[in-house]
Amino acid sequence: MRVAVLAGGRSSEHAVSLSSAESVRDGLAEAGHDVVWVQLARDGRWLHDGQEVALRAGRGLLSCDVAFPVLHGPFGEDGTVQGLLELLDVPYVGAGVLGSALCMDKLLFKELMGAAGIPQVAFVGLDERRWQSQPEAVRADVRALGFPCWVKPARLGSSVGILPVAREDDLETAVGQALEHDPRVIVEAAAAGVEVECSVLGPGTGAQASEPGEIVLTDGHAWYDYAAKYTPGGMELVVPARVSPTARARVRELALRAFRQASCDGLARADFFVDGERVLLNELNTMPGFTATSVYGKLWAASGVPYPELVDRLVALAVARHEQERSHRH
């Protein structure tokens, strides 16, 4: 198939996206696909071979059979590009508009998971207006959550803009930094136990979960920050995770429940904290990293699906979903 790999994007995760997309390009080529590289510039332009791409509704994308949007963060992973690909009538890898937008917003995602009864890390949400007009009320909410805690932009990934907060005096600085990236902020309680991740692959109702893996930090990293995620040697992935068989089964069960509940499709990586037999969902990433150090592909490789086969299956799933959706009248 002729596959358009979308790389870069407008968000602060532009560089990570380029690295991920290069790995996807190489995997697709090894699987026998004809790969078309489309780079999304930071200013929003779509470029192919140095020329701006003409995007016209219903006219496809560079005569490609399917698109693989290897885009992280806003304007790529949040349903915006997915909506554009829908208008172009191009099959694409990953969650649709609804699932992408929902999982990108950590606050909405957690509210949905809570309504579904899925156990998760405790959190408090705030926005820029409330922080400015009711700072003491926000502080009271965070005090009830407890210290230490984590302050994050609500709609970014790759640990961008995240700060640990050990005491209340540090809260203002952390919230201010998060608000530089997003007007919506989430504050999460610190969770005990080990960090465990699980990859999901397949259609929404028939997806499969990989063997869970445990994140072990190396090179003196205190937490799983940007450097630990994307620097070779920054972390070690232990597969299977060193938790009980019951906890591993629970991780896989909750990963699939969250995937279906959030209307995901194709792929996602679910992140958990496991403390004994207690398993708490942290978040779901609909376009996880695909770099050489990224967890999503490593977990599937450890589960018996090599990288070229993985990306090949993802584009096949995208085409099948597109054909099935076109069979309905809207």
Image (cartoon, rainbow, N blue to C red):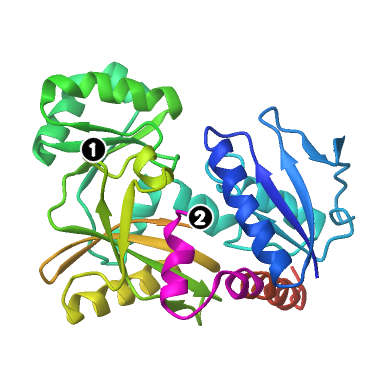
Residue 299 is covered by the magenta coloring: yes
In the image, residue 62 lies at what x, y percent? 88, 53
| Along the viewing direction, whichever of 258 and 163 lies nearer the viewer | 163
Q: Is residue 234 left or right of residue 87?
A: left
In the image, residue 138 lies at what x, y percent? 20, 28
**Mark number for residue 150?**
1
Q: Tell me the quadrant of the picture where the N terminus can be found.
A: bottom right
Q: Amino acid at mark 1?
A: Trp
Q: Is residue 28 left or right of residue 114?
A: right
| Along the viewing direction, whichever of 69 and 232 lies nearer the viewer | 232
Image quadrant where residue 237 sits? bottom left
- Which numbered disc, 1 or 2, marks the residue closer to the eye? 2
Q: Is residue 264 visible?
A: no
In the image, residue 234 lies at what x, y percent? 34, 46
**Mark number for residue 247?**
none
Q: What's the residue at 45%, 62% (across, down)? A: 296
Q: What's the residue at 44%, 40% (across, down)? A: 155
Tell me: residue 290, above or below residue 204: above
In the image, residue 146 lies at what x, y percent? 9, 38
Q: Which residues are magenta?
A: 287-312
Q: Is residue 194 visible?
A: yes
Q: What's the residue at 52%, 59% (across, down)? A: 99
Label 1, label 2: how many angstroms apart (C-alpha)?
27 Å
**Residue that mark 2 sits on:** 292
Q: Is residue 82 left or right of residue 164?
A: right
